[in-house]
Amino acid sequence: MQDESAAPSRGFEAWKDAFRRHLAPTSSEPIGLVVERALGVWIHGVDGRRYLDLLSGIGVANLGHTPPEVVDAVARQNVRHHHVMVYGEYVQEAQALYAAELAAITPAGLDSVFFVNSGAEAIEGALKLARKATGRRGFVAFDGAYHGDTLGALSLAGNERSRRPFEPLLGPLRLLPFGDARGLAAIDETVAAVVVEPVQGEGGVRIPPPDFLPALEARCRATGAILVVDEVLTGFGRTGRVFAVERWGVRPDVLVLAKALGGGYPLGAFVASGSLMRVLAEDPPLSHVTTFGGHPVSCAAGRAALGVLLRDRLAERADTVGARFLDSLKETLTGLPGVREVRGIGMLLGIELDTAARTRVFVEQCRDRGLLLGWTLHHDHIVRLAPPLITQEDVFEEATRTMAGVLEASG
Ligand SMILES: Cc1ncc(COP(=O)(O)O)c(C=O)c1O
């Protein structure tokens, strides 16, 4: 889509050269979109084109890019103070009040927030908390799981190919089938923590049957295993509730947050009851610390973003508008070449195609036509959509027509 208002930057050939030579690669074929700016649902390239961000920077920009409320809050915090002391020592307004606001909206009893810098780091904290609180060593996770790429978080990955080069990983670990309540009997009194995504993102947008998460909670209560629910992707309205656990009435022992938590800035958190969280402050004290965790600018940005999410009832919007987008995608794409299934919950949607090759071409051709989407980490034949929760319906309609056109042409 052509962007008439964009004034392309100069000198970007040098950025591309520096990117290619000096930025550590994560794959052999980076997308390489040269970003001029990002506003609302659009990312503007230096080529003068604008791209609809159907990924929200992978689940971060739930309010769209650079929302004015967040820009203002960051500007105000920027002139007050940046980092002043390692986490947990000084009282900082943005950090303390954000913790209180999160405690008020997370499931009952989760009233103590440990801020860190990312999702993987929050998972690490949750694993340490569970081991220290229970005195047990074992972990349980699920096939298809993704919890981040640090060694501890990677230890929970439900994908053999991701794990193998880095073994031995943390254990003992048992990987159980995601969505199958019958497998939960394997959770026993040796397990410190069971870590689960309410809806798997990188595992291929997998939505569990209604009995699974309540049965998991019951099994954790019966065995004393700590239930860690990873809402890094699903939190902050993505699935049509502020937190996805609300859909199933499940109360985690530890809730893990990141991505949209920081309103576009780096921030992660694990949230638990005050009594559980105390174990990290004693014997020895400072059992878990971080320098930058809960950075005041990230907390100011996150508070502003949460304020907008609640004020504009964006979780409800994700539920209703997301359901209409899903219906329209199903109606339009089902039966087109290669389409196996279209599924979703709120504004987390998946299009399962027949092959990785077709998926790759689909994603590239959508990008050529101004749509940013991608396949999931563990399944390269499943396309994931996680659009900003503010996306207008006519924009979804046009995107649906574009996707259909690409698939029709793929024969
Ligand atoms: C469910 C889930 N957990 C954890 C993570 C890791 O978060 P981060 O990339 O901030 O370390 C991700 C990242 O995609 C995620 O989707």
Image (cartoon, grey):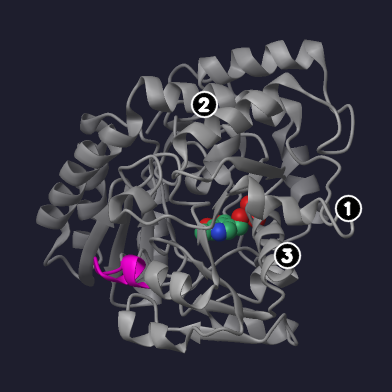
What residue is disc 2 on? 305
Q: Where is residue 222, by image quadrant? A: bottom left
| Of pointers 2 and 3, the one earlier in the residue sequence | 3
Q: Position of residue 318 (x, y in %)?
A: 29, 38
Q: Is residue 293 magenta?
A: no
Q: Which residue is mark 3?
A: 128
Which residue: 39% across, 39% down? 242
Quarter of the picture containing the C terminus is bottom left
Check if mark 2's residue and mark 3's residue have beta carbons within 8 Å.
Answer: no
Q: Height in image: 87 above or below 253?
A: above
Q: Nearer the viewer, mark 2 or mark 3?
A: 3
Which percent across, then down, holds residue 32?
61, 50
Which quarter of the frame holds ligand 1? Answer: bottom right
Q: Earlier in the sequence, mark 3 or mark 1?
A: 3
**Looking at the picture, does residue 20 appear above or below residue 89?**
below
Q: Residues within 10 Å of mark 1 (few under 14, many from 20)?
A: few
State which quarter of the image contains the N terminus: top left
Residue at 66% x, 77% y is 155
Q: Is residue 174 left or right of residue 182?
A: right
Label 1 element class:
loop
Name the side, left or right, on which 321 lies relative to 331: right
As shown in the figure, which amino acid type bears the numbered disc 2?
Ala
How far apart are labels 2 and 3 at the CA level?
A: 29 Å
Res 102 seen here? yes
Magenta span: 208-215
User: From the Cβ of disc 1, is ligand 1 less than 8 Å away?
Assistant: no
The residue lying toward the viewer, choosing from 162 and 316, is: 316
Q: Mark 1 = which residue?
A: 285
* Residue situated in front as seen by the camera: 59 or 127: 127
Q: Which residue shows up at 51% across the image and 20% down it?
A: 6
**Residue type at mark 1?**
Pro
